Image: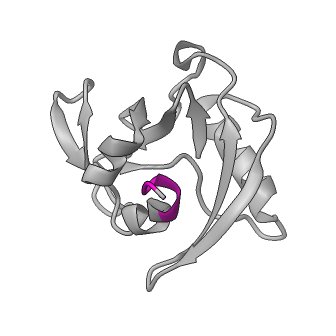
Amino acid sequence: MLERDGRWLMQLRDSIPGIVAPGCWGLFGGHLDSGETPEQAVRRELIEEIGWPAGELNFWRSHTNERRVAHLFLGPLTVPLEQLQLLEGEAMALVRSAELLSGRIWSEAVQEFRPLAPGLGEALGPLLKPH
């Protein structure tokens, strides 16, 4: 979870049948390679997916459901969105917490609302809900 100006960086996943959550909004990241720690994996994935070597990343929590274990990290996005290269996915956007809580996010790229990836709202809930 990368944050800039009170908004979170999200990826609109490719609409390719057979991938996890096609056409849904998710986080940049991916699977761990053999021998990789979760932090090494997220840093590698950020370079592969947006061409950005993240600075500060802090482990926040792990979330498990029947499909996967997600290791979530928090950190600042220290560059403007325009300086990132979208190398994987249909689009990226900086999204307010209220939009994430709604479960649907507008995509300028495809000109429609798209849902969050299954389980993502549940995983992010403790971060987004007002205390």
The segment highlighted magenta reads: 126-130
34 or 129, which is in the foreground?
A: 129
Q: How is the image coloured?
A: one colour
Going by the picture, which residue comes out furthest to the front?
131
Q: Residue at x 41, y 62 (%)?
A: 120
Any magenta on residue 18?
Answer: no
Quadrant position of residue 129: bottom left
Provide residue 21's location: percent of width, then percent of height.
Answer: 34, 60
In this view of the protein, which residue sits in the foreground, 62 or 67?
62
Instruction: Name the image quarter holding residue 106.
Output: top left
For the image, the number of numbered tags is: 0
Which residue appears farthest toward the left when viewing the image? 112
Residue at the far bottom in the pictured view? 66
Residue 20 in view? no
Would residue 25 be visible to someone looking at this image?
yes
| Residue 80 percent location from the top left of the image | 58, 16
Instruction: Report the predominant secondary structure element of the magenta stretch.
Output: helix
Residue 55 position in % (x across, y down): 80, 34
Q: Is residue 129 on the magenta stretch?
A: yes
What residue is shown at x 60% (from left), y 39% (from top)?
Answer: 2
- Which percent across, then down, holds residue 125? 44, 63
Relative side of 119 to 65, left or right? left
Q: Residue placed at 32% from the left, 53% from the top?
A: 101
Please, is residue 55 above or below residue 121 in the view?
Answer: above
Q: Residue at x 15, y 34 (%)?
A: 112
